[in-house]
Amino acid sequence: MTKRKPSPFSATKAVKSNARDRVGQPKPARVIDTEPRTGREAKHKPKLHQIIQQEE
């Protein structure tokens, strides 16, 4: 069998590996639950004539 060719040196991977050894693995990302979108009407303030009609 032929010998495996070594992969080219990557400074980024070396730095990240060194940081993991010293500091430890980063915590996994958490999914933040967002409120469901209410639609276009809820994004805008009601018009003045709409407020007056609701009071009557």
Image (cartoon, rainbow, N blue to C red):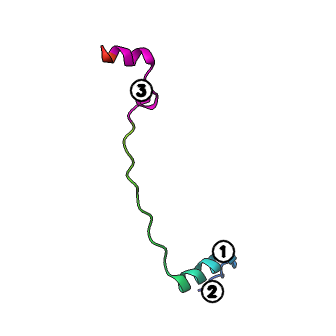
The residue wearing badge 3 is 41
Q: Mark 1 or 3 closer to N-term? A: 1
From the viewer's side, name the closer residue of 5 and 49: 49
Q: Which image quadrant: the C terminus?
A: top left
Helix, strand or loop under label 1 = helix
Q: Which image quadrant: the N terminus?
A: bottom right
Picture residue at 45% right of the left edge, 19% below the top? 47
Helix, strand or loop under label 3 = helix
Q: Amino acid at mark 1?
A: Thr
From the viewer's side, name the closer residue of 10 and 8: 10
Q: Dominant secondary structure of the magenta stretch?
A: helix
Report the span colored magenta.
38-53
Q: Give x and y (percent) for residue 34.
A: 39, 48
In the displayed structure, would residue 50 be above or below residue 40?
Answer: above
Name the side, left or right, on which 47 lies relative to 13.
left
In the displayed structure, would residue 21 be above or below residue 26?
Answer: below
Picture residue at 66% right of the left edge, 78% below the top? 7
Total number of numbered discs in the rendering? 3
The residue carrying pointer 1 sits among few (fewer than 14), some (14 to 19) or many (20 or more) residues within 10 Å by Cα, namely few
Q: What number is the disc on residue 3?
A: 2
The residue wearing badge 1 is 12
